[in-house]
Every structure is written in structure tokens, then in C-alpha cells.
Amino acid sequence: MPRLASFKVLNNRVSSALALATGILLTLATLGALCLLGWHEYEVRLDEDRERGDLQARVLEDHVTRSMGTVSVALKYLSTDLARADILGGFARSDAMLAQALVALPFVRELSVLDTSGLVLSSSSANEIGLRIAPGRLPTDLAAGQEALGAFQAGRSLASLADQATPGKTTAGLGFIPFTRAFRSRAGQNFILVALLNPDYFSNFQLFTLNNDKNAAYLLGYQGNVLASSGPDALPPGATVAQHPVFSRYLPKTEHASYVGEGVRPARQVVAFRLSKSRPLVVLVEQPYADSLWRWFASMRWFAAAAACTVVFILFVTFSVRRSLLAREAANAKLTAARLDLVRRERELRVLLKSVQELIFRTDPQGAMTFVNERWEALRGQPVEQALGKALAAFVEPADFEAVAHLFAPQNGAGVRMATAHLRAVDGALHRFDVTVVPLRDTGDSGAIVGFAGSAVDVTERFAAQQALQHQLAFVASLLEISPAPVATINSRGQYTSVNRAWEDFMGIPREQVIGQRGTAFMSEADAEQHAQADAQLWRSGGTLRYELKLKHRDGSRRDVVVTKVLVPGEEFGASLLSSMMDVSEFRAAERAIDDARAAAEESSRAKSEFIANISHELRTPLQSILGFSELGMLRGREQPKLQSMFTDIHASGARMLALVNDLLDVAKIESSVGAITLERADLRGLVQSVLHELSPLLDAKHIQLACVLGKQPLIAKVDPVRFQQVVRNIAANAIKVSPAGGEIRVQGHITEDRRICISVRDQGTGIPTGELEKIFEAFVQSSSSKDGSGGTGLGLAICKKIIDAHGGSIQADNNAEGGAIFCVYLPARQSLNAETTF
């Protein structure tokens, strides 16, 4: 007994120590969980702030880029209009144009036109005309079409940049951002179009986007100069932040990012920045790191309080259990455990009843509800207490009252009673329920009913789905019946289970004689064998199978039919094959006719090409003799002008005939395998410049100026260099022919938005009639404007089109608005290049 008592004491002490150790471990675990949760919440809050900063920077960058793009487009078209209006002819019209353009640009304060010396010639503000801008305050050495975005300038207008301007008092932060574009007038003079951007426009949008009185935003130049800013303690426009980490550590290798660390303002910041997609501008958004910490602390204080309560509770329970283990005997501990288990089970049952989506209820013997779960409140929109003491039948639709009341009738001796009823929800929708009740009987000898336990399952969606399925099946059956294609279904035994009306019309057999019969009963042995093989493949591998064969039509003819079969899985009635037929007899006949016609056309084209090639070779030999003897006659007839004139005419006619023969031979080569195109990777700029150098004697003879603008960016494409130079040579030579003496020919090259290389040649000739723009690329066709003798054989442009088509490109002709024609050659670019932008 003493040993047993000692053992019990030792056992109680061990249990007490374990309880204490468990409490301490739970306390440490709770504190550890709180720390992990706090760290997680800190990371979540910081990530949210960084994502918010990234989003705000993206919105501000998009706004700045689009605004600058709008100004650039407006200045481009305005400079074009000013150049066309001949700005030297009078400034009254240009002032009106500037004022009208200013109305459409709300974020532009002023528009002005300056000459290259800085003199204001025209302005939307009349008092600015005649001022001279101090040297270096605005860029005046821009090339025509070049743009520049300046730094922030303090002042209200261009007057603050004048060389006689006197410094005055200005409101802090008041200024403008100059945006300039150079253009050239028709007389060839250079001018500068200046737009004064309002920094407050960007600051206001920043404030609207940030929507926070603690955050700051900056619009910075690529050198770190502040153009616009917003937010508390933000640096004013005109300041510089060139030492900011964004410029020292991230740009230019990283175009957008966010981090926590040093910012413009002294304290630690959550910084997000983004580089403009098309302008040398940087958008910077800063959020105080202390604000993020405060919001993190605010979100964690309730968790900390809950953790503290939990720790106190654990310690309290630990010491209570320790004292209980020392004071109570094993029986009391088991009794306590049993009671706790009973409480837990009751709580779990209540939670389970709350989470059940079905309606659970209990009634007295007369059917009045004594309990109903929370689903009632969600369904009816009224507290559960209002339903207690009332019969379930009182809440259903009148048509279902009798069926529900019968569930609780004493004479109903069924063990499980079921009915269908409709109950209207709080939103007015009518729900369909399957109601099931089970009588609860007295455990005594009488076995009397003391109440009912039941449930109501909402089957509204299932019932609607069944109705929709029935409707869909009926619709599909009707659709198959009216389908013009013959359709049939076959079961796994090869028997027809259904056919549509089109199948009956095609086969000439009524469906009463088909249903239940095997398909081989209505086909020849060969057709039945082919169908059997296809069916076996479908049953084995599933999917869809399509094949073509000839079937006997009801009129006795054999028709070409495309049969499509698909395996339709099924459970209740088993899988089946769905078969449809399409009569393609007329289509196959048309295909055969087309093949015959194509073969005849190809044979005719081949014969034509061979004939042209042979006749061209045959004509070259006598033409070479004619040219040789005519040159000899010209040489020996120098002392006899009349004789020399005759030989000169013979030589010119022969040369013209030889050019025609060469063109015919080129056409034959391109159309035949002899003239195959050999493509290689090349920079088109060198090929174009080489051709233009060859034609320099012709340009000098007519005193024609050549403007070649191919850019610094490589124009890489896969071409046949000889053939491509032939195209450029032909187009450029035509431009020289039609251009007047002393005119200008402009050759340009660039990459289009859809990643194609464009080589354009523009002349100052008479142009091409609109109705002939497409016909001039046809063989032996000349423009009516060149039939005065300046044209050729009419094959040059046709050869050019065939060469460019063989390269996978295109060639187009159009009339220039300022006179003359422009020919554009488009070829696919073979490398990804980024267009350069000048600021």
C-alpha cells in the first residue's frame, strides 16, 4: 500500500510537471506564432505599399507619356500647318492658329514661334511678340522635325527668358516646362515652335492619383531635375535629385522598380519609380516608411491583445490543471474529461447545424416547430424565434399546404415521410424543396409520437437544370431533324437507333424500316466493309473520324459523300456513334474541272515564257550587229553630218530595241526557274547608296538635287542584292526622267510600325493620274503623263513588282500632296530595332 501510495504521488507529480511544461510550451508557441504572424503581416503591408506605389507610378507615367505624346503630335501638325500657311507672309494668321491650337491643349500655357536667333515672331499671347530670348535659355539649333523637352523654368511666360528680362517676384513653384520643335518654312527658313507646359497640371494629377496627404510624387528629367512635384515636404520644381538611388543604382539598366530605403525626403521611404516608355522622363512615388509601420502596428494590436489573452488563458489553465491533478483522483479526472467531451460534441453539433445549407427543424406532435437552424433566417430573412411555435405548412405555398400538413398527420403511419413543397425566399424568389420528416417516438412502452425531426433540401437549381436538360434534348432532336445533312446514330451492336429526315430523303428508306436494323442491310458489301472498319477504329480509340466514299443515292446514282463519325459516351443507354453525311459530288466535279484548267493555264504560261526567252535570245544577235555597225558608222561619218545623223538614229533605235528585249528576257527569267531569287541578309542602306552613286551622272546632267535620308539605324532584310538594286535603279531612273531640271529627288528609308522596311523615292514630276496608280505595275502599261517620249517600254515597273513580290514584300505608288509622285518599296525586317527619338 505505501508503495502504491508513493506511486500515485509520483504519478501526480509527474502529471503536474508535464502540465506545467505543456503550458510553458504552449505559451512559447503562442508567442512564436504571434511573431511569425507579425512578420508575415509586416511583409504583406510592405508588399501592398510597394504594389500601390508601382501602380501609382505606372498610372502617372502613362499620363505623362500620353500628355507628352499629345503635345508632340499637336506641335507636329501645327508646324506643318504653319509651314503650309507660309509664316513669313504674315503673322496674324499664325497667331490665330496658335490661339486655336491652345484651346485643345489645356495643359499648355502658351504657344509661340521663334526664329533661330530667339526672336518671338508669333505667339498666342500678343504681349510676347517681339521679345528676344536670351541665348542658351531655349534650344535654337535643332534640325527640322527635331523636338526637345527643356528643364523647369521659373516665371509666368517667355518674357522671363528674354535677354532684357528683369528679375521680379514670382510665386514659389510657379513656372513652366518648355517643349520645342523645329520646322522649316516653304522658303527654307528654320523656325522654333515652343509650347510652355504647365507643371501644375501634372502636380494636380499626381495629387488626384495619390489620394493621400502623406505621399509625394515627382516628375523628373533623365538628369534628375524636378519638373513637377506634389505632396508634403516635396522638393519644388527646378531642384535636382541627381544623387537619388534611382539614378545612381537603378537607371538605366532597370526601367521600373520599387524598394524601401533612401528617398528625396529625409526619412526612410517606400519608393517606386518608372521610366517613360518614349520620353527621357522618370516618375517617382514616395510613401513614408513610418506610415507603413504605423498601419502594420494598427493591424497587429488586436492580434497582440488576443495573443496576450491566450497566453494568460493558457497559464491560467495550466496552473488550474496542475492544481486539479494534485487534488483530484483519477475518477474525477475521467468524469471531467467525459463532461468536456460532451460539451465539445454538443458544440460541434451546433456548429454543424449552423454550417448545413439544408433546412433542419424539429416539431411537436402537432407539427409546430420547436427548433430550426440558421438556414431559416438566411432563407426567409426573419429571426428564428418568429418561426418557433408555428406549423411548417403555414409558410409554404397554398397549393402545397395539404401535402405538407399530411406529413404530420397522426393517421400517417409511414416511418419516413416525404413531400415536395415551394417556399418563397426573402427576395421574393420561389424555391422548390424536398421535405423529409421522421417521427420521434417515446422510448417507453407506449411508443407514442412525441415530435418530428426533418429536413428540407433546396432542389430549385437541380429541378431547373433537369427542365433545361429536357428542353436542350428536345432542341437537339429538333435541330437534327431539320438538319439538311443526313444524320444517324448507331449503338454498340451496329444497329440504327435514330435517323433524321435528310437521311430518309438521301437513302430513300423510311425510318420505320431502318430503326433496329444493322447498317449492312442497306449497303453494298464494299461500303459495309469500309463502314465496319471505321466503326471499329472509333469504338477502339474514340474521338472523331472523317472519311470519303461513294454511296448509292435513292435515284440509283453513286454520290461522293464525306462521312463524319464521332463517339458519343453514355451511361444509362450506353455509348453510341453519331454519323453525318455530306454530299460533295458537285464539289469534286468542280475540283476536277479546276485541276484541268490549272494544268492548261500552267502549260500555256510555260510555253509563253519559253517563247519570250527564245525570241529574246534570237533578237539579241542581230541587234548587237546593228549597234556595232551603227557605232562604226557614227565614228567614220563624223565629217559627214547627214550620214552621222542617220547612223545616230539607227543606233538609238537599236538601243531602244535592245532595252525592250532585255526587259522581255527579265520577265521570262522571273517567271521561270532560271530567274530564281537568291536571298541573303544585307543592310539596304549600302545597296541603295551604291545605286544612287551610279546614277550621279544623270543627276548632274539635269542639275537635280538628291536628298538621301536613310538614318543611322541599320535596315536589315533578306534580299537578292542584284535584283533589289535593279528595282531601286529602275525607280530612281524613272524619277530622274520625269523630274524637271533643277528639281529635287528625295530617297528615304525607315522601319514602319508593323515592323517592315520602307524605301521611298519622291520626285517633283507631273505625278500619276489617280485612275492609273494600280495599272502602271502591269506589263506594257505606261502612265499617260509619260507618253510624251520620256517613258520606256512599260516593262520596268512590272519587273520591279515581280521582284518585290518574290521577296515577300510589296510596292506602291501614290501622288505627293506637294506635287510629283512617290514610290514606296516594303520588305519584311529581319531584326528587332527600336526607333530612335531625339529630345
Image: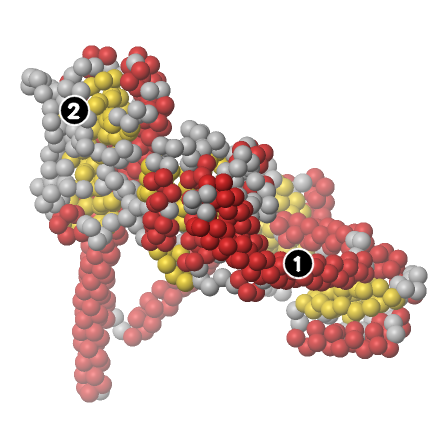
Q: Decide if residue 484 is on the left or right side of residue 341.
A: right
Within 10 angstroms of label 2, few (less than 14), some, or many (20 or more) residues? some
- Please say if 306 is above or below 108: below
Which corner quadrant holds the C terminus?
Answer: top left
Label pair 1/2, CB-CB below 8 angstroms: no
Snapshot quadrant of residue 584: bottom right
User: Which x, y percent locates residue 724?
Assistant: 44, 54
Q: Amino acid at mark 2?
A: Ser
- The residue lying at 45 percent from left, 33 percent from top is 765
Q: Amino acid at mark 1?
A: Lys
Of 229 and 281, nearer the camera is 281
Query: Looking at the image, is mark 1 or mark 2 earlier in the sequence?
Result: 2
- Please say if 626 is above or below 327: above
Of 833 and 186, nearer the camera is 186
Q: Residue furthest left?
A: 167
Mark 1: secondary structure: helix
The answer for how far apart the CA atoms under marks 1 and 2 are is: 67 Å
Residue 821 got which mark?
Answer: none
User: Which x, y percent locates residue 812?
Assistant: 50, 43
Within 10 angstroms of label 1, few (less than 14), some, or many (20 or more) residues? some
Q: Decide if residue 373 is on the left or right side of residue 577.
A: left
Q: Decide if residue 174 is on the left or right side of residue 732.
A: left
**Residue behind mark 1:** 608
Residue 356 visible in rendering = no
Of 327 and 574, nearer the camera is 574
**Residue behind mark 2:** 117
- Please say if 623 is above or below 108: below
Q: Decide if residue 650 is on the left or right side of residue 106.
A: right
- The residue lying at 23 percent from left, 52 percent from top is 254
- Please say if 620 is above or below 159: below
